[in-house]
Amino acid sequence: MKNYDLHIEKIRELVSGSQSKEVTLQSICDYLKNNIPHYDWVGFYFADHTNQTLHLGPHAGDPTDHTVIPFGKGICGQVALSNTNFLVPDVAAQDNYIACSIDVKSELVVPLFVNRKNIGQIDIDSHIFDAFSEEDERFLEEVNKIVSKLF
Ligand code: SME
């Protein structure tokens, strides 16, 4: 256990605060990146269902050029269509992958549902190979459940 219960309490506090949605999401990204050692990049992408594109929202970590991703492209684009988590232990083994940095070795993307609609996702990159477990999936599902209250 990596203090995930404590982190959930912190996320709840941030979401029930009085800051704007944008500031709250940024604080969540900063908090997760700064407090969970294997989370090297944390960001939210939001879906434009009309244009079938994902758009980068608040994020923490190295800057990325990939601010707009078509549905179906990369790990994020695949999750926009599949509505399920995508855990990638080794990004080098993925054909349909968009590289943001050569330092990234593994990735986990978890969809964000509001009223059962997939409105976007949280994307975590790690510089460690095979960094993520089912525990991270359950944790990020819980984070997204709390975040969905902002919408
Ligand atoms: N690697 C992602 C692109 C987003 S960056 O990780 C910030 C993908 O393949 O969809």
Image (cartoon, helix red, strand yellow):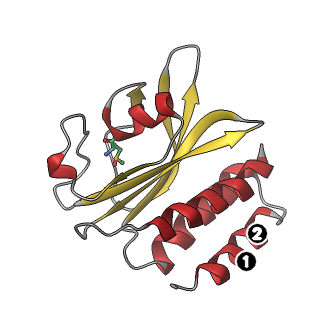
Q: Position of residue 85 (x, y in %)?
A: 48, 47
Which image quarter holds the C terminus? top right
Q: Position of residue 88 (x, y in %)?
A: 31, 53
Asked whether mark 2 and ligand 1 are closer than 8 Å, the reply comes as no
| Callout 2 amino acid | Arg
Q: Nearer the viewer, residue 60 or 110?
A: 110
User: How many circles with numbers are drawn on the protein?
Assistant: 2
- Compared to 47, does 23 lie above or below? below
| Callout 1 amino acid | Glu
Marks 2 and 1 close (CB-CB < 8 Å): yes
Give the residue number, with chain letter if any, for mark 2: 12
Q: Position of residue 120 (x, y in %)?
A: 57, 38
**Residue visible at 40% across and 55% down in the picture:** 108
Secondary structure at badge 2 equals helix
Give the residue number, with chain letter if any, for mark 1: 9
- Compared to 71, does 99 lie above or below? below
Secondary structure at badge 1 equals helix
- Compared to 128, does 137 lie above or below? above
**Residue visible at 16% across and 56% down in the picture:** 102
Q: In this view, does 93 lie to the left or right of 147?
A: left
**Residue visible at 78% across and 60% down in the picture:** 19
